[in-house]
Amino acid sequence: MQHLLENIKEYMDMLDDTQLRTTVSELTVAELIEVWDFLNEKEKLRLFLLFDHDVKSEFITELSTADQEFLIVELSEQATKNMLEEMRPDDLVDLIQAISPENRESLWQNMSEESRRETEFLLRFDEDDAAGLMTPRYAAIQGDITVDQALKFIRRTLDKLETIYYIYVVDKLKRLTGVVSLKQILAADDRALIYDIMEEHVIYVRDDTDQEETAKVLEDHDLLALPVVDKFNRLLGIITFDDVIDVIREEQTEDIYKMGAMGGNTDSYLESSVPQLVLKRLPWLVILLLAGTITTNVLSSFNDLILAASFLTLFIPVITQTGGNCGTQSSTLMIRGLATDELHFRDIWKVIGKEIMVGLIIGLSTGVIIFLRGLFLPPGIELIQAITVGISLSAVVIFATVLGALVPLMIHRLGFDPTVAAGPLMSTVIDVIGLTIYFKVAMMILGIG
Amino acid sequence: MQHLLENIKEYMDMLDDTQLRTTVSELTVAELIEVWDFLNEKEKLRLFLLFDHDVKSEFITELSTADQEFLIVELSEQATKNMLEEMRPDDLVDLIQAISPENRESLWQNMSEESRRETEFLLRFDEDDAAGLMTPRYAAIQGDITVDQALKFIRRTLDKLETIYYIYVVDKLKRLTGVVSLKQILAADDRALIYDIMEEHVIYVRDDTDQEETAKVLEDHDLLALPVVDKFNRLLGIITFDDVIDVIREEQTEDIYKMGAMGGNTDSYLESSVPQLVLKRLPWLVILLLAGTITTNVLSSFNDLILAASFLTLFIPVITQTGGNCGTQSSTLMIRGLATDELHFRDIWKVIGKEIMVGLIIGLSTGVIIFLRGLFLPPGIELIQAITVGISLSAVVIFATVLGALVPLMIHRLGFDPTVAAGPLMSTVIDVIGLTIYFKVAMMILGIG
């Protein structure tokens, strides 16, 4: 594979279309995507045109918006029609939403009547809700038929269905009343009624359930697919596990961005323009900068102390950085625990107890290290100065460790997303309070002020 | 549900065992787990004993190690036997590996001959590899039988299989030669041969494939299950999508911990002891602290400058914090892009181009803000001082933005995990170099030194 990737351009030049088509037909879509990145526009178009319709329809959903636009402009009307016909309705909706309005129009015109109807139905829902993930191509039957009838029905309609492994049981008003797996159907007697073998306690989500919550429901119950119902309990569609994996990945990116002091969308880096990147980064930076300048006032208010004991200046970055790191560690543990439902606000006393213990141990350890470092390594400070720095750092670390754990729990309790208290904001807060502790402790030990 | 959770203890006291069993039978395992956390040991045992065998076997795999140990000690021999009989082999292996050696022995003795054989087979593999996720309960057939025969075989054996939705085709030596989905079988003519309808290009992983890599393969191909083969291409077992979701979650926790300057395992916070938490946190803290103390030497070397222009001290924390934030943003974007395979080392020139542009814009913006802030807000500094701080911050930000992007790409190129260059380490490096830039720029503008 690696060999093929490196030589794909030469391969493409060497082979005629028939030979290339044979080579390509042996690759999976995931492998083709890897090849894609190495090609120029002309080569991309040549490759794409050699795909079968079903590969085209799957392939295009995996591309960047820019590549999708490019293909839609370049493809003939007939090629577009054939490709759209093979696309899953939820992928079609994503494509429609991603591309620019002018190209959207040409897509609509090349869609079949049925696809257009399905797409219009799905477009009514918010893309960040459960309904934004669903496909209307599910298997539904009524409960009063036999296993044999159900199996025949599935075999007849399976071309049109996204998954046949769960079959949902609905009443005459399309309300969800049960679910039966294909495994249960195959295990049952042919003459048994679906009513008698179905699971009545169906796990479902409402159309307006948040997508992260939806992912958790599917995950907690190890389901292949999850039905989506409206407020009258009518079945609207199903969400399959592969779409849920995508949600988990996206959520992961969002959380990691928040920890890296960035907001905004999770678009691909290479595709984001410079203004988009600035927009993602600058707002948080400015907020943190403005909050961080409070340290200027803190330092200014201890001006006399700093003049009298100028060695204190030398340790300002180490004190703030170490305090920030400890606070970040605590807040990271809390944020993760809250996100995975492992921690709750009711655990606050256990958390405080643990963090005080942990804070004491790491506070004393880091204090001893900076004491020894100050005393024995250049620039070299006096004993009383090293003691001062050691004790101050210990105090800052203990404080930062406990605060770092408390703030996310509080924010969560107030109903907000605790991830805002991740690394960068926590460090900034600790810079301000940590410096104050540092100087106060120093004043006490040195007997100044 | 919330209501039930809050009152579960009263419910349990009010109801006799038969009534409680009825209530409990209507809850899913995920719901029962939520209830569980509110109970004391006696209540936990009472509840657990009311579960059906299959619920018990599923439930215990979701518990913490402490709760698993507790139940295994408390359960009668017969109850343990019944529960183990229902457990999936991969869950059984996880349980065996989690509990203490003394309780492990009693588990072994209560396992059936078959379970013990399966478990011993699975225990031969590394738990972090693909083989550590697999179950030996897959459906395998030979290719020379008809669709009708295959369907009959599946219906006969489905009780023993983890999934029947993919059926693997093997030769006489158990080598993997194809795969056919249940959907394809149901769609095909009863008399067709499996050979003629199967997919020959099987996506598989080797037993020693890393589990994160395994997750990506299943995810990229939207598969329900993935076969695991040995080096002779013999089928060893299959990995199902739900186990892959668990791997993705675990990987997410690991990455987030690394961004929060923590290493070690991803055990639950509440279950980790204080020494375990210290071990997870202290090593990184000490490394960062020792690296961070280089700033002490930097500051000491610019001692004369600081004495001549003491206002520079006031902005040390803001400069280091903002530089660190910019570097963290860049490194986060790179780490995430590399992890999701969206970025590669070959993109380095595009990245440098973008980061220089982004760095210029955010550098100038933050420079102007700190300039205005210094000039107009307390403690208030002079014009030339504000200019100095503004230009210095811009320079640090531009540098930090570009460095933050380059370091993870370099680390990745060298074959290491770029996540080590996440937030905390990046901030520490930038503290050292950023301060040097700050003072050098100040010296030039102020004409000192």
Image (tube, coloured by chain):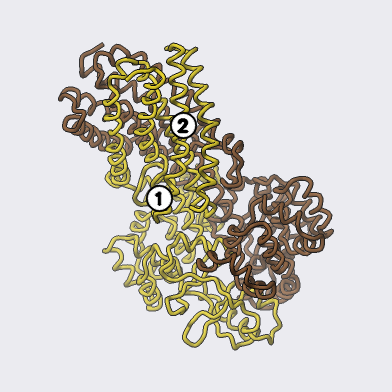
Chain colours: A brown, B yellow
Residue B368: x %, y % from top left: 52, 22
B325 sits left or right of B151 in the view: left
Question: Disc 2 to disc 1, how far (Cα)?
Answer: 21 Å
Q: Is disc 1 on the same chain as disc 2?
A: yes
For this rendering, which residue is in front, A232 or A298?
A298
The answer to whether B323 is drawn above or below residue B270 in the figure is: above
Marker disc for residue B437: none
Q: Which residue corresponds to the image point at 56% horizontal and 74% vertical from the top-left?
A: B202
Residue A182 higher or lower than B6, as above or below: below
Indicate which disc residue B397 carries.
2
Q: Indicate the quadrant containing the C terminus of chain A: top left, top right, bottom left or bottom right.
A: top left
Q: Amino acid at mark 2?
A: Val
Label 2 with label 1: CB-CB less than 8 Å? no
In the rendered structure, find residue B411 and report the number of the disc placed on it: 1
Q: Earlier in the sequence, mark 2 or mark 1?
A: 2
| Residue A94 point in image, percent of width and height | 69, 51
Above-or-below relation of A197 to B41:
below
Q: What residue is rendered at 81% in x and 55% in y?
A: A117
Which is nearer the eye, A232 or B198? Answer: B198
Q: Is residue A132 visible?
A: yes
Q: Residues within 10 Å of mark 1 (few under 14, many from 20)?
A: some
